[in-house]
Image (cartoon, grey):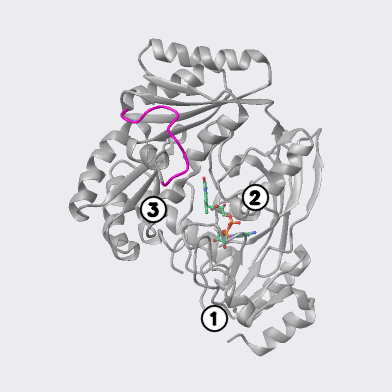
């Protein structure tokens, strides 16, 4: 139950269409591929920064917890709510305010979807290079708050690297207009970074200045098979060098995953036969000259001569390229019968075989008959492990986490490469961050949100 005085003040300040409650609220899914509805006292949909400021100021005065919702595609339960929470949704803040082709920036509201930004940039001959499978629903405010990664980090970096400015509202309603448009601006602390990757715990992001790039005129894509892991690492280095900076994706697939997404009932078919040690999707984005394709083919040819690649299928059309990407994106195959236990970790590339040699048998011992699929953004040292444990995921998760995350401690790996901490991983934060770092995070939280109303309990307990 919300404080009646607070409800009255909110209703007086915002239009009726700003409120969703009761059955209409419970009918909304609580997250991507979830069947349960949103459990919250009220969902408020402000339409402007001023309205966000008003909502937060009033909630702060009443010590009311506020959970921010973007597209609800986050995968670490950061946007989960309780019946006592108030949800602040950015769904009515979807304006693409401007695109400046000379400065190569877009100014957008936080609730605009990633796909809408990509399309708007594309219409101007530019590109916003962030790309995730959830592009149609995920918002750029959510992308910034989770510092999302995706498929092209190897070339363009994480979301953090694509944001020049941020406007955020603090818990007490103060608006921080850090809407920098300049690539170079070393005037004191870079305040936008406080809010990027903070998972909504330090402020609500309301507007962003996004850095755009010239749109690549063509993409060359291949699926390749390699004889062993060392060859895969050597291939990554070879392609990066040979392509002179235009390598834009390097996605590794261990055989169990490749076979899963290229065998019925999956729709995909294998562009190269099964039976190899490992597979990789390699993409290069170029300026459009016929020399791009030639250079791509030549680089792969050299890799074959050196024995780094044992088979390759180079896409001959956009449709073939899309079909190869669809294999990599078909993670839904791992969810066929029941939700699996999924992990998103990162570690030094050279340590991956040893890490998997430790984790695989440990999982098999603990969960006899289980299945493990491994794939990931190899160029970024990011692995996704998906475990079908033979029991409900919630039951398997604690022991599986102890195995998968425990093995990262000694090698200084990260328990979250790109999805954040949310509620799901906070017990494991200490594997990847020191006590001093966590203490500083707490101090920042205390300073910016002294009443602890913003997304409380995410990342660490208050
Ligand atoms: C099919 C699929 C593929 C995916 N692929 C990737 C991938 O390749 N890489 C990757 O990194 N992630 C991936 N994700 C995860 C997810 O899409 C990202 O985390 C995304 O950035 C979340 O955006 P969202 O708008 O859905 O945020 P939400 O899920 O709504 O929220 C995520 C977190 O951010 C906070 N938040 C949201 N908006 C704001 C705001 N304006 N201000 C402050 N806090 C806010 C929320 O409170 C929550 O803590 C994938 C998810 C799916 C379902």
Q: Tell me, yes or no, if residue 433 can be seen here.
A: no
Q: Is residue 30 above or below residue 279?
A: below
Q: Quadrant of residue 438?
A: bottom left
Query: Which residue appears at 62% of the width and 62% of the height?
Result: 203
Task: Give residue 103's position: percent from left, percent from top.
Answer: 79, 35
Tell me, yes or no, whether the highlighted magenta stretch contains residue 270.
yes
Pointer 1: residues within 10 angstroms few (<14), some, or many (20+)? some
Mark 1 and mark 2: Cα distance apart in space = 30 Å
Q: Tell me, yes or no, if residue 40 can be seen here.
A: yes
Q: Nearer the viewer, mark 3 or mark 1?
A: 3
Q: What residue sits right under mark 3 in the picture? A: 342
Mark 3 and mark 2: Cα distance apart in space = 30 Å
Q: Is residue 311 above or below residue 198?
A: above
Q: Nearer the viewer, mark 1 or mark 2?
A: 1
Q: Quadrant of residue 292?
A: top right
Q: Earlier in the sequence, mark 3 or mark 2?
A: 2
Disc 1 element = loop
Q: What residue sits right under mark 1 in the picture? A: 84
Query: Which residue appears at 41% of the width and 54% of the height?
Result: 335
Q: Nearer the viewer, mark 3 or mark 2?
A: 3
Q: Which residues are magenta?
A: 265-276
Q: What residue sits right under mark 2 in the picture? A: 192
Task: Give residue 181's position: percent from left, percent from top.
Answer: 75, 42
């Amino acid at each position: 139950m919300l404080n009646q005085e607070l409800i009255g003040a909110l209703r007086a300040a915002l239009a009726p269409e700003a409120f969703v409650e009761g059955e209409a609220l419970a009918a909304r899914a609580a997250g991507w591929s979830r069947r349960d509805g949103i459990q919250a006292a009220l969902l408020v949909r402000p339409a402007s920064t001023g309205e966000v400021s008003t909502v937060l100021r009033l909630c702060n005065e009443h010590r009311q917890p506020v959970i921010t919702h973007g597209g609800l595609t986050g995968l670490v339960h950061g946007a989960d709510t309780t019946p006592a929470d108030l949800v602040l949704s950015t769904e009515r803040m979807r304006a693409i305010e401007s695109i400046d082709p000379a400065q190569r920036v877009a100014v957008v509201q936080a609730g605009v979807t990633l796909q809408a930004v990509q399309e708007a940039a594309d219409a101007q001959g530019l590109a916003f290079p962030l790309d995730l499978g959830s592009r149609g629903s995920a918002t750029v405010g959510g992308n910034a708050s989770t510092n999302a990664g995706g498929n092209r980090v190897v070339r363009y970096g994480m979301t953090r690297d694509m944001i020049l400015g941020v406007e955020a509202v603090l818990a007490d309603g103060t608006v921080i207009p850090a809407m920098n448009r300049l690539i170079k601006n070393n005037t004191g602390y870079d305040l936008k970074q406080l809010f990027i990757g903070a998972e909504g715990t330090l402020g609500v992001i309301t507007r962003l200045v996004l850095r755009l790039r010239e749109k690549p005129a063509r993409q060359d894509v291949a699926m390749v098979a390699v004889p062993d892991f060392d060859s895969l690492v050597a291939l990554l280095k070879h392609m990066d060098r040979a392509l002179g900076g235009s390598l834009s994706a390097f996605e590794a697939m261990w055989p169990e995953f490749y076979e899963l997404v290229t065998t019925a009932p999956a729709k995909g078919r294998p562009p190269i036969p099964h039976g190899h040690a490992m597979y990789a999707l390699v993409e290069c984005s170029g300026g459009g000259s016929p020399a791009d394709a030639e250079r791509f083919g030549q680089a792969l040819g050299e890799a074959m001569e050196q024995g780094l690649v044992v088979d390759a299928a180079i896409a001959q059309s956009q449709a073939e390229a899309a079909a190869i990407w669809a294999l990599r994106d078909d993670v839904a195959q791992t969810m066929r019968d029941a939700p699996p236990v999924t992990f998103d970790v990162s570690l030094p590339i050279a340590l991956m075989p040893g890490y998997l040699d430790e984790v695989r048998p440990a999982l098999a011992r603990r969960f006899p008959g289980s299945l493990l699929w491994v794939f990931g953004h190899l160029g970024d040292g990011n692995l996704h492990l998906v475990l079908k444990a033979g029991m409900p995921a919630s039951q398997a998760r604690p022991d599986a986490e102890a195995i998968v995350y425990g093995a990262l401690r000694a090698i200084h790996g990260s328990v979250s490469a790109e999805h954040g901490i949310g509620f799901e991983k906070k017990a494991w934060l200490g594997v990847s961050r020191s006590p001093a770092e966590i203490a500083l995070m707490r101090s920042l939280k205390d300073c910016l949100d002294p009443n602890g109303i913003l997304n409380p309990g995410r990342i660490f307990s208050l």
